[in-house]
Amino acid sequence: MKIVSLVLFLLFFLASCGRQENEVIHIGQMKAFAEMVAADVKPLALSEPMSPSAAEVLWETAQEIAKERGIEVFRENDLVQTQLFPTDIAKGMEVLIFHKPEALRAYRNLKNTVKSGQNGEAEARTFGRLLGYPPHYINQLLAQQTEFRTMVDFGVQGINIFLYYKDLERAKAFYKETLGLEIISDYGFAATVKVTNDAWLTLVDASIGRHKAEEPKTVAIALLTNHLSEWYTYLLRENVPIKYEYKPKENNAHDGFVAIDPEGYLLEFEMFKQHPENEKLMPLLPRYDATSGATDRWSKNEGFYGTVFWLYYEDMPEAEQFLAEKMGLKQIVDQGWAKVYQVSKTGFIGPVDGRRGMHPFTEKKGTSISFLVKDLEGWYNYVQNHQPFPLLQEMYTGKEDRYKAFVGIDPGKYYFEYNRFLNHPDNERILQLLKMD
């Protein structure tokens, strides 16, 4: 009898210890979430779903935690159901919601919307934003619960931009000889030059290309370097036209100057600097010496460590939403009227407000942007079935079976081409670079 009593006591003791340990964990989580809400990191913060009895035990502590931080807590026994989480995530359970009053009103408005029958991707994104989730994380959650996907889900190997010339040979000579860039393929009517291993420029004969040389060149190409003064001196000596002079400033987020290529495309030689605006970008860039070396030690063959393709929009919120929610790209720089999104390791896209940038918004563009997608067929099938953007050209195979591609149109009427290079002698260097990914 004594042994039975001892066993029962031990079981009760262990269960009691387990409950206490769980309570400590819940309290720690609640303190962290309450701190985030107080600091406006999250509009709402949800506790883990728990039984009504467990919620009752923690309720008084939760109220004290909220009061200490100048916020409020709400006991929810009917959590809104959206596509963000499994529908049964809180079935029969309660959730403690830490919040400020305006955020709880927004949550209740969402709940009313869902109860009225509207419960799609938009409502899931609204809930995600209320929880303080960035777009790329909302994308991940939607992909786990629904058929939703973005380009990023199909693998991105690099980015390429098409530029169109009347005199292709002159353009090739400029990029190869004057800028020192490697030509990694030459199809005759088009040649691709390497800025970095995963960011390229393709120079196209405008007489047979998708765009004409006369169309507005509504793009600027930032070439990232820490040798601005050397490049500036060198390009002046080579009589390359300069649109904006090199005037470095001590406290700028970035410095640079703008040159003009043989047929009018703008090349921005740029250096991003340690600055609050660049806190997400700087760790992504290769570690180059931020203080430019002596001129006699510099060589143009050192090349560049990244590139940004600046694109110009009439409706910036629409462009940002497209890049984040349809393409799945992460925003890593916010300059207010210009943003930067990462595409590949060293290739970036920068939407710019056409009212403030170097170019205005134009209906036609003398450029196309290409994304190198690993599972091109998977992305194409998704685009066909779900129509995240209009298709300009269905999937096709390029001349001599060099590549496969399809083309869509983004909100700013840029042509976005999605590519995969095939095994072909002309692609030997390209495929070698892609394997370095």
Image (cartoon, rainbow, N blue to C red):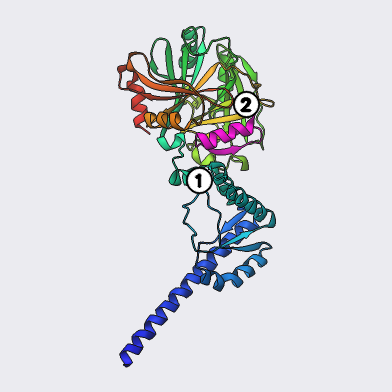
Q: Position of residue 378 (x, y in %)?
A: 38, 32
Range covered by the magenta-colored residues:
313-339
Q: Position of residue 187 (x, y in %)?
A: 38, 13
Magenta stretch holds residue 308:
no
Q: CA distance from mark 1 to mark 2?
A: 25 Å
Q: Is residue 199 above or below residue 191?
A: below
Q: Is residue 358 above or below residue 109?
A: above
Q: Amino acid at mark 1?
A: Tyr
Q: Which residue is mark 2?
A: 313
Which of the numbered marks, if any, corresponds to residue 189? none
Q: Secondary structure at mark 1?
A: helix
Q: Secondary structure at mark 2?
A: strand
Upstream in sequence: badge 1 or badge 2: 1
**Number of numbered markers:** 2
Depth check: give the residue in front, 170 or 214. Answer: 214
State left or right for residue 415 relative to residue 316.
Answer: left
Evaluate whether residue 214 shows in this view: yes
Q: Which residue is mark 1?
A: 137
Q: Is residue 216 above or below residue 39?
A: above
Q: Position of residue 44 (x, y in %)?
A: 60, 55
